[in-house]
């Protein structure tokens, strides 16, 4: 499965692509940061972000897009701009029939570092280790986009199992299935096996 991670923002947007392998093995395929000038009109900045996202999706053909869920911040204008950037990228995915999944910052931090309150430096350090990168991805927006993609890659299996069971009208998971779902969820939250990920030769 190819997962595209998107860390929204008006000034800088992080975009990353990872591919899942056996178990929890994840390989980084690409990462980039889109920048827009702060003195440019809003509609032009959003257009630049939309076009960059469209190009990425057309080139990389992701199976799903993971976007950071935007929460109200101290500066409402910043939160609004971030939400608008997330919206145009979700729209680009919709035009291509690519499913979109929203992840909270604390959820991503917990999956990557085991601590939902981890700072950006901790997230960057763990992303570098998990993906076997030769150097930390810079700026932080790039690391955040990779973290989003890895988080979804690790948590999606457990969530899919639970969702499929519910849609089948079979009620709550029980027995072996419940244990599998719980184990997958706990491993994702704790960021287990991060140090055992093999190095990626696809990105530096």
Image (tube, rainbow, N blue to C red):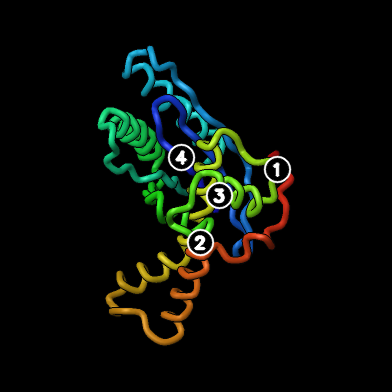
Disc nearer the start of the sequence (2/3): 2
Kindly identify which residue carries mark 3. Answer: 122
Disc nearer the start of the sequence (4/3): 4
Q: How many numbered marks have been drawn onto this rendered protein structure?
A: 4
In the picture, residue 91 is in which quadrant? top left
Which of the labelled discs sits on residue 145, or is there none?
none
Tag 4 and tag 1, C-beta contact below 8 Å: no
Disc nearer the start of the sequence (2/1): 2
Secondary structure category for the residue under label 3:
helix
Q: Which of marks 2 and 1 is in front?
A: 2
Disc nearer the start of the sequence (1/3): 3
CA–CA distance in space, label 2 to label 4 = 21 Å
Q: Which of marks 1 and 3 is in front?
A: 3
Secondary structure category for the residue under label 1:
loop
Secondary structure category for the residue under label 4:
strand
How crowded pointer 1 is (Cα within 10 Å; few <14, some 14-19, many 20+) is rated as few
Kindly identify which residue carries mark 4. Answer: 6
Q: Which of marks 4 and 3 is in front?
A: 3
CA–CA distance in space, label 4 to label 1 = 19 Å
CA–CA distance in space, label 2 to label 1 = 26 Å
Which of the labelled discs sits on residue 114, or is there none?
2
Residue found at x 50% / y 43%: 144
């Amino acid at each position: 499965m190819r997962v595209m991670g998107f860390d929204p923002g008006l000034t800088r947007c992080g975009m990353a692509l990872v591919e899942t392998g056996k178990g929890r093995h994840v390989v980084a395929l690409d990462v980039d940061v889109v920048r827009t000038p702060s003195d440019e009109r809003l509609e032009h900045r959003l257009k630049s972000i939309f076009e960059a996202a469209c190009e990425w999706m057309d080139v990389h053909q992701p199976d799903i897009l993971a976007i950071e869920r935007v929460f109200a911040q101290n500066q409402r204008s910043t939160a609004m701009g971030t939400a608008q950037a997330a919206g145009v990228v979700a729209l680009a995915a919709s035009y291509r029939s690519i499913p979109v999944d929203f992840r909270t910052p604390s959820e991503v931090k917990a999956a990557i570092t085991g601590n939902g309150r981890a700072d950006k430096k901790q997230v960057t350090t763990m992303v570098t280790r998990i993906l076997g990168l030769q150097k930390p991805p810079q700026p932080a927006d790039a690391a955040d986009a990779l973290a989003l993609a890895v988080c979804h890659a690790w948590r999606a299996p457990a969530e899919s199992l639970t969702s499929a069971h519910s849609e089948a009208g079979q009620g709550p998971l029980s027995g072996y299935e419940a244990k599998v779902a719980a184990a997958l969820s706990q491993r994702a939250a704790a960021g287990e096996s991060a140090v055992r990920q093999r190095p990626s030769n696809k990105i530096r």
